[in-house]
Amino acid sequence: MKYNQMSRLNCGANIPIMGFGTYSSENVREETKQAVKTALKMGYKHFDTARIYGSEASVGEALTEAIFVDRSVERQDIFVTSKLWGSDHHDPVSALNQTLLNMGLEYVDMYLVHWPVKLKPWATYPVPNEQDFERVLDLETTWAGMEKCLDMGLCRAIGVSNFSTIKIQRLLNFASVPPALNQVEMHPMWRQSKLREFCRDHNIHVSAYSPLGGPGNSWGSTAVVDDPIIQSIALKHKATPAQVALSWGLSKGGSVIVKSFNKYRMKENMRALDLRLDDRDLLDIERMEERKIMRGEFLVNETTSPYKTIQDLWDDEI
């Protein structure tokens, strides 16, 4: 049985559960644009970008051509996510207006607070240095700006990214509009169990980035797709290890953001929507963590994420 390709958010909007990521450490505008156009032809409907990714313009060009020139898709059938960078916490409205200008769109479907940290105005690069951080984040003011973006029609939904349970609870204490979504790194070796439970209790959708463990990134690893349990389940279902990892993520009721500009892998990732893991598969994957703990092994990304320093600057972990 296939997965339902859409999930209902607490704001009433529907989000496609298979998202297409566009981050690249060395972003090539034309390559990204062509990848998005190819993804549209393959059936991807959810496109994830951010100011800091450097891909907003490329994504926007591909989408506007498909919508207004080729007329191959309707705007209302596409879900676009972008994010507020840490140096723009003082003015989310201006930041989102710039994003819309970059993309050539009238609105985005989801606007996220990228990290629960505030950066100095000059820190407009993906991995900040310690001196780039402001020690105080006035999240209440930031969220008021996010809610204003929503009221102005610049976005259809607002949410957060890389927020822990404690950070979200603080936000819920004063938010007039609760976050519709929390985007975090999640995969079979970093399961976010406590966070998922908290978000489920508060009707907050969880969207997983790096659902394969981030292979190809400087902080990522192939440990997920190389794991013998994942490979055994893939063999059982005549699927690929990547499809098994993605299906595991989808089985948790959220969405996944996959990032590959390789046409073969793009198709492979989409086919994860056709794979349903059985109870035994899910139990075996749960035991992966126990096995690694018993061996004294670190879980993938546990110490290698470039944002570990950011996380340690604050009073709780993701």
Image (tube, grey):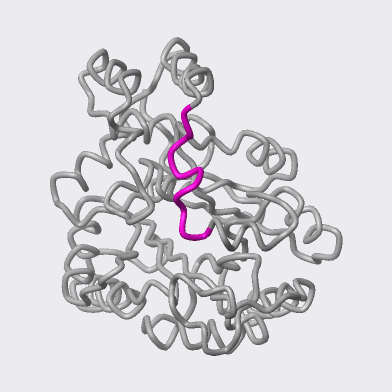
Span shown in magenta: 297-307
Residue appearing at x 51%, y 48% in the figure: 207
263 versus 149 height, above or below: above
Q: Is residue 302 magenta?
A: yes
Q: Is residue 58 left or right of residue 196?
A: left
- Residue 3 placement (x, y as % from top left): 41, 32
- Residue 72 placement (x, y as % from top left): 22, 65
Residue appearing at x 43%, y 49% in the figure: 16
Most prominent secondary structure in the magenta stretch?
loop
Foreground residue, 240 or 203? 240
Q: Is residue 47 left or right of residue 147?
A: left
Q: Image quarter for residue 218?
A: bottom left
99 versus 214 height, above or below: below
Residue pushed farthest top? Answer: 280
Q: Is residue 69 left or right of residue 251?
A: left
Counting every numbered tag in the picture gives 0
- Residue 67 placement (x, y as % from top left): 28, 72
Residue pushed farthest right? Answer: 173
- Residue 209 placement (x, y as % from top left): 44, 50
Foreground residue, 43 or 191? 191
Residue appearing at x 39%, y 60% in the figure: 77
233 versus 318 height, above or below: above
Q: Is residue 200 magenta?
A: no
Q: Image quarter for residue 61?
A: bottom left
Residue appearing at x 85%, y 65% in the figure: 174
Q: Which quarter of the figure is the N terminus placed in?
A: top left
